[in-house]
Amino acid sequence: MTHSFFSPRVFSALILLSAFCLPEGKGAFAQQPAPLTLRVALEMGVQNHPAIRAKQNYLSSAEALTRNARAEYLPNVILSAQQNYGTINGQYGPLGAAGPPGLASAGPAYPEQNWNAAFGAAYILGVNWEFFSFGRTRSRIGLSREQVGRDSADLEQTRFVHQVKIASAYLNLLVARQLVESGESNLERVRILSRSVKARTLSGLNPGVDSALVNAEVSRAKLALIDFVNNAQNAEQQLAGLLNVSAADPLIPDTLYFSKLPDTDSGAPGLAGNPQLTFYEQRIRYARQLTEVTRRSMRPALSLFAVYQARASGFTNAYNAETLAGYSSRYQDGIDPTRYNYVAGVSL
């Protein structure tokens, strides 16, 4: 009987051994994460920042208030219809209202209480239009527009400041990672030098003090590398906090900036494009418009109003305190309008 050297058990053991022997991150299936460019980092930070999302909602609210201020100029139309059932006992005497109105009954004053009841209805259409307010409505619309401009400038300023922080943290991380690589290269160089010095010391070519000095250099290089690694970890955590992402995910900045400088504008930016100056200018404009609204709020207003009313009742004009007749408890008799009134006018 013959046995093959590459049995399944031996083959599996060789695969495991080769996997353990491969350097970390050098396996066939290992994938390096893609570098994070500065442009992507800025877009990610703006999208994930809670304060920016909140100010976007403030801006949407200000735009809705602008639409509402324009709609306030339109006439106010109220349509009301009610159908009820009850008595109409009346009584002479003064009445002072306290709180919301309760019961409104219009009927004759009886010598005693009675419980005759019928259906009743009222249908009302009312229109009130403040058609001329001497600039008060226009000033409120202007104030809402200035509020939109102020909130928009505030949003752009917040984006600008946050992007500056992201760019600073990104470049700090980029430099910190380069310092880590430099520290690792320096440690490797000192170790090679240490092995060479120790070999020459053992052979008697160098004095023993050289070995102690090179050991101190190795320790110094290790401490410097630890500082560089800690600095890189802190920079990565700071960038992750600004991007609002998990610190467990590795953030690898793009090293293209070390080989090619980014394109820059040849002309100097003007003051009009500064987001912070624009925000302060919008605040001043909003304050001026608010002053105008307050000044015009003392002006009068001309309003058109009109009311059309239809009344229905199960009690007829024959119903009085002597006969107590002339009413119907039928539902149809109580909701069919029999009296109509209208009022129209102008108020100042």
Image (cartoon, rainbow, N blue to C red):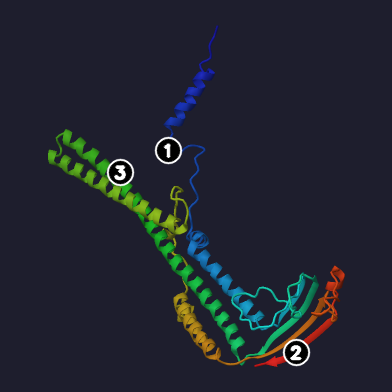
Task: Find the residue positioned furthest to the top.
Answer: 1
Task: Pick whichever, 267 or 272, lies toward us.
Answer: 272
Q: In which quarter of the image is residue 92?
A: bottom right
What quarter of the picture does the N terminus occupy?
top right
Task: Report if residue 207 is visible in the image.
Answer: no
Task: Pick whichever, 197 or 155, lies toward us.
Answer: 155
What distance separates the C-alpha of mark 2 from that of mark 3? 97 Å
Q: In which quarter of the image is residue 70?
A: bottom right
Task: Report if residue 294 is visible in the image.
Answer: yes
Across the whole image, how many numbered discs are drawn on residues? 3
Q: In this view, does 123 lie to the left or right of 64?
A: right
Foreground mark, 3 or 1, reads: 1
Q: Can you identify the residue that label 2 sits on?
A: 344
Q: Can you identify the residue that label 3 sits on?
A: 188
Identify residue type, mark 3.
Glu
Task: Pick whichever, 113 or 124, lies toward us.
Answer: 113
Label annotation for residue 256: none
What quarter of the picture does the C terminus occupy?
bottom right
Label annotation for residue 24: 1
User: Which residue sits at x=45%, y=39%?
Assistant: 26
User: Which residue sits at x=44%, y=34%?
Assistant: 22
Badge 3: residue crowd in 10 Å (few <14, some 14–19, many ≥20): some
Foreground mark, 2 or 3, reads: 2
User: Which residue sits at x=37%, y=52%?
Assistant: 177
User: Which residue sits at x=48%, y=37%?
Assistant: 27
Tell me the SS state at disc 1. loop
